[in-house]
């Protein structure tokens, strides 16, 4: 009988599993590119702790700390709010072990391109000893007799938070340490001065990190029954919801950590008649402030630039490793998220060769292919092109080239891609042209041919779409002799060698992979004896051109 029941149970379970059903058809495939993109996409993670129940009678219970954590977590999780991918809330009677294990697990999975928020609402306390003041955040099982072993040391928390991998992060504390409001002190603890420092080591902060405090040293952080929250947290929530339009000071469609704090600070001070004064320390490089709220499109635009490569295995960068500011960010093919700002980027081949190396500014919301980034960082090492040119001088050479000469040039250059001489270029080219009309003496002498050569050295810079070169160059022009026409000026009809030197400047814009349209200007001076009897004089010799070139 027992065997029958067991067999029947197995059959029922199997039938139930089969009853879940399957689609009769092909499931949509996920490409390697899509899978890698999803795996490497930056994540937004928040850990929120709200402790309002305390075991030690030395610490009175709070009313709204758990609600602070839950409601702020909900605001960060909303798709139209913070859009955080993972929100962990530890609230109520949260023990020290629970809080620390949650923080450690979160940090273990975090990557540099992620965004991280750690929030605490609850009691704080302070001790004063031989080593100076120490501040603690209190868990539900914290004992007043053993703060070092049962509470969370604020300085340790700040040091740990700065060491976590995410570049963009905010530590938000709705607690205080002076003995009133959300704080409890041992009897006899001296009052904390108002100018005490809550942030002992701001220089240790990460490049895009914010520490937001509900109050400053020596002042209370209060709960407000009418608001149903801690005062500061209530207005922080308002900045992410009803007050979004006002909190978004720069009208870019997102509310950053700084904007939310600034909004909450003014209202907290007004609500408490200046007794509670929130404080913040932010170290922001470039435009890397953490976004706390905004629709998905605006958040993506503000959060990161993406560098990607999904080329075939034959692509020279296939399998290459991407280093941003010296840190390993991933391997191509795939997508790498980079916070906005100026970064040093290297792309290193599997055999250790540096394929790309340099610094550039990556703006929020930009999407860079690896080839575009390589162009912006190193530029091409070689260029070659053709340009149409127009050359003019002053009236003293009017009988030689008239109002000007037109022609075409072919040129090539090489520029140094890396090292101390990065961007140094050497250019050379040859051209042919003609002066369409000119007046030689009393006769209309007609067109006159010319051949030229030029060279330049200088500094080149290549952006994603724009390139520029500035240097010093020289030109050598041969105007061959002409048959002397009746009434012509003999001095004008003899052959001329014209050499000129001066600056050269080129500005180009990309029109395709490896192709650019460029404009060039060479305002040179030539030293010439125009009539054969005067001392050498400085004659302007200006060349302008527009053309197409290829870079590789």
Image (tube, rainbow, N blue to C red):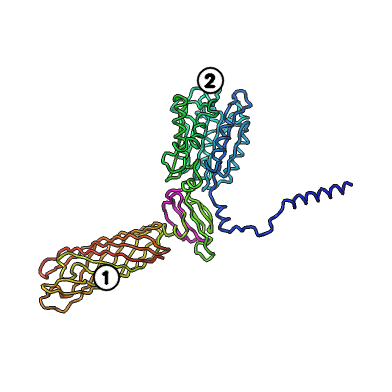
Residue of label 2: 188
Q: Which residues are magenta?
A: 340-366
The crowding category of the residue bearing disc 1, from other C-alpha atoms within 10 Å (few below 14, some 14 to 19, many at least 20), is some
Residue of label 1: 407
**Does residue 109 sit above or below 191 in this rendering?**
below
Residue 411 falls in image quadrant: bottom left
Q: Secondary structure at mark 1?
A: strand
Residue 471 percent across, percent down from the top left: 29, 60
Magenta span dominant secondary structure: strand
Q: Secondary structure at mark 2?
A: loop
Left or right, 338 with reference to 106: left
Magenta segment includes 357: yes
Query: Residue 428's mark?
Result: none
Whether residue 241 is visible to the viewer of this picture, yes or no, is yes
Say which label, 1 or 2, has the lower sequence index: 2
Residue 427 falls in image quadrant: bottom left
Residue 112 percent across, percent down from the top left: 52, 47
């Amino acid at each position: 009988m027992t065997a029958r029941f067991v067999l029947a149970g197995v059959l029922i379970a199997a039938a139930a599993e089969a009853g879940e059903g399957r689609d009769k058809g092909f499931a949509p495939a996920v490409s390697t590119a899509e899978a890698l993109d999803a795996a490497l996409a930056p994540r937004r993670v928040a850990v929120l702790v709200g402790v309002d129940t305390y075991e030690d009678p030395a610490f009175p219970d709070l009313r709204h700390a758990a609600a602070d954590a839950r409601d702020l977590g909900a605001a960060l999780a909303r798709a139209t709010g913070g859009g955080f991918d993972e929100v962990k809330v530890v609230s109520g009677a949260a023990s020290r072990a629970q809080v620390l294990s949650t923080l450690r697990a979160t940090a273990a999975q975090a990557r540099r391109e992620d965004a991280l928020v750690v929030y605490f609402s609850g009691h704080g306390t302070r001790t004063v000893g031989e080593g100076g003041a120490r501040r603690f955040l209190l868990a539900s099982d914290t004992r007043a007799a053993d703060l070092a072993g049962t509470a969370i040391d604020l300085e340790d928390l700040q040091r740990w938070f700065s060491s976590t991998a995410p570049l963009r992060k905010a530590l938000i504390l709705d607690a205080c340490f002076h003995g009133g409001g959300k704080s409890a002190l041992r009897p006899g603890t001296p009052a904390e001065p108002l100018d005490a420092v809550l942030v002992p080591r701001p220089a240790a902060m990460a490049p895009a990190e914010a520490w937001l405090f509900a109050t400053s040293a020596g002042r209370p952080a209060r709960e407000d029954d009418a608001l149903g929250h801690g005062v500061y947290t209530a207005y922080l929530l308002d900045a992410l919801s009803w007050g979004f339009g006002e909190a978004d000071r720069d009208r870019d469609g997102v509310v950053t950590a700084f904007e939310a704090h600034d909004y909450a600070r003014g209202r907290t001070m007004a609500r408490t008649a200046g007794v509670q004064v929130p404080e913040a320390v932010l170290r922001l490089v470039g435009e890397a402030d953490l976004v706390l709220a905004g629709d998905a499109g605006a958040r993506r635009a503000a959060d990161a630039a993406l560098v990607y490569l999904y080329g075939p295995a034959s692509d020279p960068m296939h399998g290459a490793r991407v280093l941003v500011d010296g840190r390993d960010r991933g391997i191509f093919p795939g997508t790498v998220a980079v916070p906005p700002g100026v970064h040093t980027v290297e792309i290193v081949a599997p055999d250790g060769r540096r394929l790309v190396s340099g610094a550039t500014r990556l703006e929020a919301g930009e999407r860079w292919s690896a080839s575009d980034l390589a162009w912006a960082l190193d530029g091409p090492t070689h260029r070659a092109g053709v340009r149409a040119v127009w050359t003019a001088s002053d009236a003293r050479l009017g009988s030689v080239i008239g109002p000007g000469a037109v022609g075409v040039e072919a040129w090539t250059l090489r520029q140094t891609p890396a090292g101390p001489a990065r961007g140094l270029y050497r250019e050379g080219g040859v051209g042919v042209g003609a002066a369409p009309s000119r007046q030689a003496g009393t006769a209309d002498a007609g067109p006159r041919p010319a051949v030229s050569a030029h060279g330049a050295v200088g500094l080149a810079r290549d952006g994603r779409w724009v390139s520029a070169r500035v240097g010093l160059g020289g030109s050598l022009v041969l105007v061959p002799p002409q048959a002397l026409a009746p009434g012509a000026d003999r001095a004008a009809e003899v052959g001329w060698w014209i050499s000129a030197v001066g600056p050269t400047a080129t500005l180009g814009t990309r029109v395709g992979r490896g192709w650019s349209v460029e404009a060039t200007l060479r305002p040179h001076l030539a030293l010439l004896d125009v009539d054969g009897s005067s001392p050498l004089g400085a004659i302007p010799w200006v060349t302008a051109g527009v053309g197409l070139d290829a870079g590789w």
